Amino acid sequence: MTDWLRALQHLRETRVPAVLVTISEVRGHAPREAGAKLVVSPDATWGSIGGGNLEEVAVRRARALLADPGAAVLTERHDLSDRAPVEHGVQCCGGEVTLLYEPVPVRRAIAVFGMGHVGFELALLLSRHDVELHLVDSRADQVTADRTAPLRTGPADVRIHQVPVLPELVVADLPPGCDVLVLTHDHAEDLALLDALLRSDVPGSIGLIGSSAKWVRFRAKLADLGHDASSIDRVRTPIGAPGPLGKEPATIALAVAVELLAAARFPRFRPVRETPTF
């Protein structure tokens, strides 16, 4: 396995954004052949497209893309002639290269607390998307290998948390910016989770399933636990896209998934540990 490939996998696992730079075309003489790759993170690089001015320009361009939330795939053509204007020194190979810049964003993270009827249907829908999906339940029979097997056949990175006591402790293990949905089988467990989530800077959003009557009671209890009104307002309830709906678990799950996936919010992330050198 090459250094750039190992680096890209590590950055994906540790939730660090990157840009993959590839020499997509070469005309004439160039320091590297077509297909050479360079991975650029906010503070490190792996691989090489030939060094010198070309690579310095590529690194700077890649980091500009990392700073742009709306960055898309980009191609640029570079003249390696000593007559071409350069910023970081001269490369006079005499050829021309085309660079392909592919942003590799951090995958969105979603946590579902409660793997009952609605939670399972929701997990099944979300598992069909390229997300990091955390599934939590205090009941062992809800997260067995057989029951969760269908959730592992899609592109999602599914992570199961079976916590028989105090599932709210899982909150500290979630990635920063994670969107959290609370729909457990137990209102006391829901309340404990909301209390932990509101005390944490982890969640990007918090959604709670339930009726308006349930939320009236929960607002009062959260206030008794010391949360002010602005903090409590972070909780979104009811959840689900508006429209004609039914009460079947699959229908509720579909409405929730549509609302969640349609959100045009992509939180900023921070690495969970330092970027290593391979």
Image (cartoon, rainbow, N blue to C red):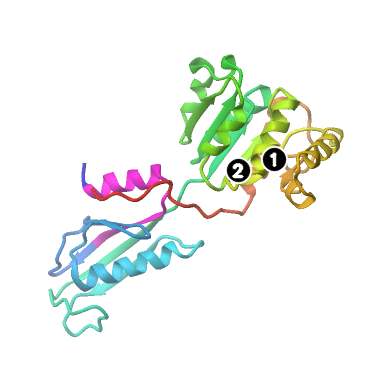
Element class at badge 2: strand
Crowd band around label 1 with a 10 angstrom C-alpha radius: few (<14), some (14–19), many (20+): many
Side (left or right) of 267 relative to 231: left
Residue visible at 40% across and 44% down in the picture: 14
**Above/below status of 88 relative to 62:** below
- The one nearer the camera, 130 or 266, is 266
Place of residue 3 in the rendered image (x, y in percent of width and height, measured from the top left) = 22, 48
Quadrant for residue 67, please give it.
bottom left
The quadrant of the image that shows the N terminus is: top left
The stretch of residues the image draws in magenta is 3-24
Residue visible at 27% across and 44% down in the picture: 6
Quadrant for residue 202, please give it.
top right
**Above/below status of 118 relative to 230:** above
Residue type pointed to by label 1:
Gly
Q: Which residue is mark 1?
A: 207
Q: Which residue is mark 2?
A: 179
Q: How far apart are labels 2 and 1 at the CA level? A: 8 Å
Residue 128 appears anywhere in the view: no
Residue type pointed to by label 2:
Asp
**Callouts 2 and 1 close, C-beta under 8 Å:** yes
Residue 22 among magenta residues? yes
**Above/below status of 62 relative to 159:** below
Side (left or right) of 188 relative to 266: right
Q: Going from the N terminus, do you reach mark 2 or mark 1 first?
A: 2
Quadrant for residue 118, please give it.
top right
Place of residue 26 in the rendered image (x, y in percent of width and height, measured from the top left) = 20, 65
**Above/below status of 122 relative to 44:** above
Element class at badge 1: strand
Residue visible at 74% across and 26% down in the picture: 188
- The one nearer the camera, 35 or 271, is 271
Place of residue 244 in the rendered image (x, y in percent of width and height, measured from the top left) = 80, 38
